[in-house]
């Protein structure tokens, strides 16, 4: 293949594509003879595509499968079924040894900067660790310099190379995690709640850093978060998850300004806006109860136990992502209907 | 204004019903660890009236929880020492009361709901027993009656099927339901002041909305004073009447809700408001507050915000600014408070 063709390909082909991705965790009982008594349907039929330089936001409540999805995408979990392609190469069914070269191209930034860094390793060793695993990327004698460049890139002083994680604040540790993820010059970063554990004033620093790196390096991000305000700020496209399934998918304006799925609407209406003048002027949808267990999710539409629009059909048939009559964005609801819950209405 | 609160149980001796419900004035708390003094709260001042919600906001480590624990009288000493200030409940300085009086105040007059309901509840006892215990100990209520009251409370806070759930243990409840149980316990003895320390931080946003609505409706119904400690300015905008902003152990700004958001008079509050993304607008670049919140063990000289402050001048590194009024009911601890308030700085 000549270079030009390759480039044209990468401009149109997604850097990351998942098709009908499923991850079920068996629940086993018994000490000697284990038998499977059920399955946690953590991720259940997720499709996604991501292009170079773009950010896909994934939002949803605790336990809806966001972290499991993240681990599947970077090869830390093996899918029960379905396909994952990174730069066109299938990784869903590779053995861990054969995944390794592909893994270079897609890296994970963890949620918790407090526990994801080994406390006994220096920052230099943490960031340089990927070079040990992929020894051909950077020659040994250039590694220290490369680590210093990475520290500089994420806004940390290269002089701190010999310090330990506990000597850094939460925001700084998250920068270390980002530097480590960038070491192998990946094309895709999967960020699992990268700012959730940080203070507001520090969140902005890390978000702006991610945006700058994206502009400079042409990175694509899967940005997972439960904070819908943060995702609005960083994502080009957004997928809303509920109990292992994507229930609505669209561009930022489609999801935030024209949501069509009742769950998306409830989620958005629950996010408070920092403006006292809007108090009492936004739609208020208060859902009943909590998210049900993914072990035996409700039949049909998984949201039906909390949905105010549910009808008989919802318990019997599983709604799939469908575009509306006038070509609106894909929504998995039989009664999808646009409703602005984000802005002041009254 | 609606009449006096119901003071059930023991009335606080010397209480003046015309005094503000709760006044904290120049409260100071330090920790003494290995011979070092760490000033966790250096000057906390605020006033809470009946039927109102005061939001205390600030980043982690700014002293919000230590302040609320000092008000509740539940700080462990050692290592914590209250080194100054007053905490007046209806005019009575609680810091001057003996432990027995303070025990009466806890639960009866001031109650607290923590962020982490699981560790605040006893895992070995059913939630019904734990709520009932409050009635038995403080009110001498009999077993059957206490259980009945526990069921009523669980019902009040929206636990479905309270009759059966009363015998369940904390781990059998979801995060949101446990927080409801915590609220039920806090309400048991009908306090006039409820402190909620990050009550929804660990919860999902749809559950947060449920809990905030519950807190708000109970507060209005009972005409309680609510202190809501949070770092979520969205929640503040939704429910608070007044706001106190803490930074490095000090209340650096106090204002009514509208002024707090529309006319901040402290550079820290102003920067914070510009640093948060909003769900209803596609923001521009977020304003970044450079640097880190200070470590209370080694605070910057002068104004503790000066290393991060865009408005700082030379004197800020030398002189600590006093708390100054910029308008009726609006104070700020900044040398240039008036200019910031007028948006000239
Ligand atoms: N290794 C595992 N074995 C069994 N169940 C699992 C495993 N990992 C995750 N799960 C379950 O799968 C579901 C989805 O979990 P996941 O961690 O992906 O959720 P999440 O959306 O990331 O939640 P949070 O917002 O709390 O981080 C949960 O019910 C979880 O308990
Ligand atoms: N038991 C303790 N011993 C020593 N320092 C403490 C203790 N508890 C809190 N602190 C310190 O007091 C300061 C204020 O803490 P806290 O009130 O919990 O902050 P916030 O609730 O605003 O996040 C922090 O610097 C914290 O480290
Ligand atoms: S399919 Fe039915 S239950 Fe599901 S979201 Fe739509 S209306 Fe609600
Ligand atoms: S006193 Fe100076 S440093 Fe402190 S907030 Fe005001 S301008 Fe900034
Ligand atoms: Mg997760
Ligand atoms: Mg706290």
Image (tube, coloured by chain):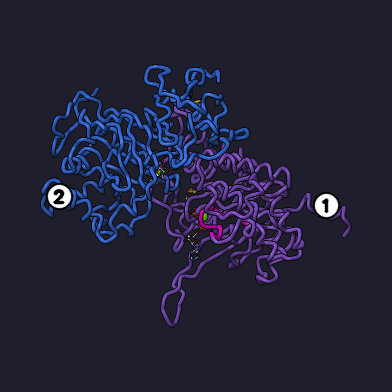
Q: Position of residue B108 (x, y in %)?
A: 19, 40
Magenta part of the chain: A108-119
**Rendered position, B157 above or below A116:** above
| Residue ID at (56%, 55%) | A164
Nearest-to-viewer mark from 2 and 1:
2
Query: Is residue A51 highlighted in magenta?
Result: no
Q: Which residue is mark 2?
A: B137
- Could you say which is closer to the camera, residue A146 or residue B304? B304
Q: Position of residue A122 (x, y in %)?
A: 60, 58
**Callout 2: helix, strand or loop?**
helix
Q: Position of residue A179 (x, y in %)?
A: 65, 52
**Rendered position, A129 above or below B303:** below
- Could you say which is closer to the camera, residue B62 or residue A12? B62
User: Chain letter for blue?
Assistant: B
Q: Count residues near mark 1 (Cα–Cα under 10 Å), then give few for <14, some for 14-19, many for 20+.
A: few
Query: Residue B93 occupies which quadrant of the picture?
Result: top left
Can residue A211 be seen from the camera position used here? Answer: yes
Q: Which residue is mark 1?
A: A7
On screen, residue A109 versus residue B26, left or right, reads right
Q: Are marks 2 and 1 in contact (CB under 8 Å)?
A: no
Mark 2 on the same chain as mark 1: no
User: Chain letter for purple?
Assistant: A
Classify the position of the N terminus of chain B by image quarter.
top left
Query: Which chain hosts label 2?
Result: B
On screen, residue A161 versus residue B142, left or right, reads right
């Amino acid at each position: 293949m000549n270079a030009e063709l390759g480039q044209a390909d990468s401009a149109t082909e997604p850097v990351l594509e998942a098709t009908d991705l499923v991850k079920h965790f068996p629940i086993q009982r018994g000490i000697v003879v284990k038998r499977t008594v059920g399955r946690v349907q953590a991720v259940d039929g997720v499709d996604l595509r991501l292009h170079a330089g773009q950010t896909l936001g994934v939002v949803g409540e605790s336990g809806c499968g966001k972290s499991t999805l993240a681990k599947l995408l970077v090869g830390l979990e093996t899918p029960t079924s379905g396909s994952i392609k990174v730069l066109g190469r299938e990784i869903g069914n590779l053995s861990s040894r054969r995944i390794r070269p592909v893994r270079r191209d897609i890296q994970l930034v963890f949620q918790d900067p407090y526990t994801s860094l080994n406390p006994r390793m220096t920052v230099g060793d943490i960031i340089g660790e990927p070079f040990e695993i992929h020894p051909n990327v950077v020659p040994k004698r250039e590694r220290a310099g490369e680590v210093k460049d990475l520290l500089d890139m994420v806004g940390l002083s290269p002089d701190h190379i010999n310090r330990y994680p506990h000597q850094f604040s939460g925001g700084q540790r998250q920068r270390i995690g980002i530097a480590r993820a960038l070491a192998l010059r990946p094309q895709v970063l999967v960020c699992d709640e990268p700012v959730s554990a940080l203070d507001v004033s520090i969140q902005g620093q890390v978000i702006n850093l991610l945006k700058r790196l994206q502009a400079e390096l042409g990175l694509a991000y899967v940005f997972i978060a439960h904070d819908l305000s943060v995702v609005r700020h960083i994502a080009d496209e957004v997928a809303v998850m509920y109990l292992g399934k994507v229930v609505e998918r669209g561009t930022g304006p489609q999801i935030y300004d024209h949501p069509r799925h009742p769950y998306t609407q409830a989620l958005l209406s629950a996010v408070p806006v920092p403006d006292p003048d809007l108090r009492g002027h936004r739609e208020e949808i208060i859902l009943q109860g909590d998210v049900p267990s993914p072990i035996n999710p409700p039949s049909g539409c998984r949201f039906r136990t909390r949905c105010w629009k549910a009808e008989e059909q919802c318990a019997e048939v599983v709604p799939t992502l469908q575009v509306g009559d006038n070509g609106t964005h894909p929504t998995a609801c039989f009664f999808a209907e646009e409703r602005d819950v984000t802005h002041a209405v009254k | 204004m609606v009449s006096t609160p119901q003071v059930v149980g023991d009335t606080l001796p010397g209480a003046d019903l015309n005094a503000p419900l709760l006044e904290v004035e120049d409260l100071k708390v330090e920790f003494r660890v290995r011979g070092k003094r760490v000033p966790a709260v250096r000057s906390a001042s605020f006033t809470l009236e009946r039927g109102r919600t005061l939001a205390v906001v600030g980043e982690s480590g700014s002293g919000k929880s230590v302040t609320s624990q000092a008000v509740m009288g539940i700080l462990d000493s050692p290592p914590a020492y209250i080194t100054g200030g007053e905490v007046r409940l209806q005019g009575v300085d609680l810091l001057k009361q003996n432990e027995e009086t303070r025990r009466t105040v806890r639960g009866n007059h001031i109650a607290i709901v923590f962020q982490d309901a699981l560790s605040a509840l006893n895992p070995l006892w059913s939630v019904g027993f734990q709520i009932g215990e409050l009635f038995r100990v403080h009110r001498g209520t009999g077993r059957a009656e206490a259980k009945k009251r526990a069921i009523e409370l669980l019902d009040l806070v929206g636990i479905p099927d309270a009759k059966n759930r009363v015998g369940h243990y904390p781990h059998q409840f979801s995060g949101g339901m446990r927080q409801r149980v915590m609220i039920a316990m806090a309400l048991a003895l009908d306090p006039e002041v409820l402190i909620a320390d990050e009550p929804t931080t660990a919860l999902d946003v749809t559950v947060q909305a449920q809990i905030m609505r519950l807190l708000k409706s109970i507060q209005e119904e009972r005409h309680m004073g609510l202190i809501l400690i949070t770092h979520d300015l969205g929640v503040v905008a939704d429910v608070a009447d007044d706001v106190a902003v803490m930074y490095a152990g000090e209340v650096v700004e106090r204002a009514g809700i509208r002024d707090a958001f529309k006319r901040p008079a402290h550079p820290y509050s102003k920067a914070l408001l510009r640093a948060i993304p909003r769900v209803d607008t596609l923001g521009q670049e977020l304003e970044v507050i450079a640097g880190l919140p200070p470590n209370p063990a080694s605070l910057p000289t002068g104004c503790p915000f000066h290393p991060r402050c865009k408005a700082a001048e030379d004197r800020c590194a030398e002189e600590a600014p006093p708390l100054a009024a910029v308008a009726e009911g609006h104070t700020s601890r900044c040398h240039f408070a008036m200019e910031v308030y007028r948006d000239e700085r």
